[in-house]
Amino acid sequence: MRALTIQPSAANSAEIRDVPDAEAGAGEMLVEGLALGICGTDREIVAGDYGWAPPGRDRLVLGHESLGRVRTAPADSSFAPGDLVVGVVRRPDPEPCGACAHNEFDMCRNGKYTERGIKEIDGYGSQLWTVETDYAVKLDPRLESVGVLMEPTTVVAKAWEQVEKVGSRSWFEPKTVLITGAGPIGLLAALLGVQRGLDVHVLDLATEGPKSEAVRALGAQYHSAGIGSVAARAKPDVIIEATGVSNVVFEAMASTASYGIVCLTGVSPVGHKIAVDVGSANRDMVLENDVVVGSVNANLSHYAAAADALAKADADWLSRLITRRVPFERFAEALEARSDDIKVVLDLTA
Ligand code: BGC
């Protein structure tokens, strides 16, 4: 079968190669790959800046944003041939740490977790893949054209859960959320904000195009001015930061209303230094009881929450987020980031 492989730490090593056909072991399903979402992490891996091959191997099958159709499933499982499924990204560390032992592998404490297509286990970028039934989630068949958005939705489902858990330490009735960045994470965070009945504001550099149209179609407000002026007007109770851009991250921390919560979801490049007034940020955070919380990955409860959120969403709105579908063999085009892209998807069947 054909698989999109890379050599971690080597820049631009992505190649589709023939690899042995996937074969399901005990407790696993064999799945026909339908689509693979491409995100910033995949581009970082392809650039040689992130990613780990499986032990004893040079190359890793790329891809963690999956969508497939079950070919074979264990008879005693809740899956059947034909089901639309998504595979979970992370697996608990083998020891396991306390969090992994409690199925909270998204909160792994010792860093020995593994991730499909990212860290030491092959990903979902192949015509066939296998997945343990315990780490697969069935999707509503109506979501076939947009179900590949599931994994980024799990990431925002966890981010919202973190915001709500932090908020619940005292009286908390948030009204307004500001989301920085209108990529897939920002837009899906906006969707979940609208589903919660909040007044949603989204900020991005693009002044026009599919991002602003998607925000407006959601009934949220789109901004392309600086975060300081937008926050001064909107007075957000919550900021979900989805750019990872240093000065936006820092301004987000300084821009909430009292009892503000900033949830950081964007992984920044390292080494970019900016001058900041830490004293002023510290003073505001203390005097306002503010919290900044980082959030990564998602556990099975977030996959369930994400499946619900997608099932409730308007499928036409979701399909706006997929701005390019690229045939598998033309993967190089999918790996290029273009300015009007929201989500680029590889069609594993083409
Ligand atoms: C993925 C997460 C993963 C993280 C760090 C993100 O792109 O969505 O599932 O935990 O990268 O590897």
Image (cartoon, grey):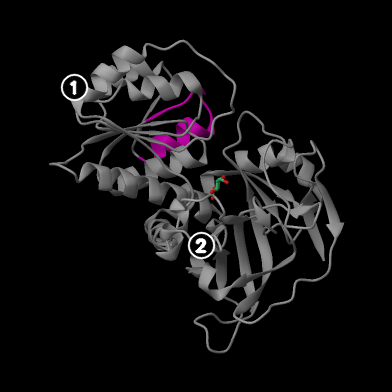
Q: Image height check: is 141 above or below 90?
A: below
The residues bearing labels 1 and 2 have C-alpha atoms spaced at a distance of 46 Å
Which of the two residues, 319 or 22, is positioned nearer the viewer here?
A: 22
Q: Residue sitting at 53 percent across and 89 percent down?
A: 76
User: Circle 2 is placed at which residue position?
Assistant: 143
Q: What is the residue that sits farthest to the bottom in this orientation?
A: 75
Chain part drawn in magenta: 202-218
Q: Is residue 147 on the magenta stretch?
A: no
Q: What is the residue that sits farthest to the left in this orientation?
A: 171
Q: Residue sitting at 62 percent across and 41 percent down?
A: 41
Quadrant into which the N terminus falls: bottom right
Q: Image height check: is 154 above or below 46?
A: below
Asked whether, in this view, residue 261 is left or right of residue 136, the answer is left
Asked whether, in this view, residue 64 is left or right of residue 189, the answer is right
Q: Which amino acid does label 2 sit on?
A: Leu
* Callout 2: SS: helix
Residue 224 coordinates in the image, percent (x, y): 44, 20
Q: How crowded is mark 2: few (under 14 residues within 10 Å), some or many (20 or more)?
A: some
Quadrant into which the C terminus falls: bottom right
Q: What is the residue that sits farthest to the right in this orientation?
A: 18
Which of the two residues, 98 or 323, is positioned nearer the viewer here?
A: 98
User: Circle 1 is placed at which residue position?
Assistant: 287
